[in-house]
Amino acid sequence: MASHSRTCRDVSPLPTTGPTSRRRRWRRSTSGSRTGRPSSPPPIDAIRAREEVRKALAEGASLMTFAYVPADGKLERVNISMDRGLLRAIDATASARGMTRSAFIAMVARREIAGF
């Protein structure tokens, strides 16, 4: 029985188009500065000024804005005060969803900031 093996030369390079490539370009464009923090997204007027966006909007596309809350990946411990009954309701809801209290509060805060 013949065995088959591949060398690095047999493997095709990563695609230059398609979803994988778009994700890679997006990561590069949002990778931020030398500090490692994500860069801020461009203003909505700058996005509307792009030729491909103007064309898409003219063809019936829509543009939606939302609050941008950058996550820097570092957790910070905070102390907050709230009504005990509200805290119990938060804990019960978070538990029913398989979440921690902190994760639930963060999720609700993000939704509220985004206006949903």
Image (spheres, helix red, strand yellow):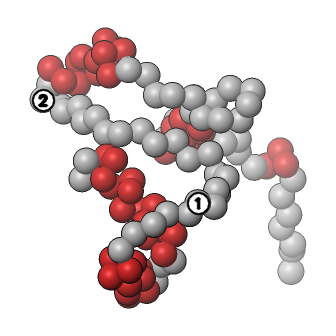
Examine the rendered structure and indicate whether residue 5 appears above or below residue 30: below
Q: Nearer the viewer, residue 96 or 86?
A: 86
Q: Where is residue 53 shown, x and y percent of the image?
A: 29, 21
Relative side of 61 to 82, left or right: left
Q: Is residue 16 visible?
A: no
Of the residues shown, which amino acid type is indicated by label 1? Val
Residue at 34% x, 47% y is 113
Figure disc tally:
2
Q: Which mark is residue 78?
A: 1
Query: Which type of secondary structure does the marked residue at label 2 adopt?
Result: loop
Residue at 68% x, 26% y is 33
Relative side of 74 to 110, left or right: right
Of the residues shown, which amino acid type is indicated by label 2? Gly
Q: Which mark is residue 2?
A: none
Q: Nearer the viewer, residue 28 or 74?
A: 74
Query: Which type of secondary structure does the marked residue at label 1 adopt?
Result: loop
Q: Where is residue 1 shown, x and y percent of the image?
A: 86, 80
The local crowd at label 1, few if under 14, some if 14 to 19, many if 20 or more residues have their Cα within 10 Å, is few
Check whether the beta carbons of the residues at disc 2 and disc 1 lie within 8 A of each other: no
Examine the rendered structure and indicate whether residue 105 appears above or below residue 38: below
Mark 2 vs mark 1, CA separation in Å: 45 Å
Examine the rendered structure and indicate whether residue 57 appears above or below residue 93: above
- Which residue has dot 2 on it? 60
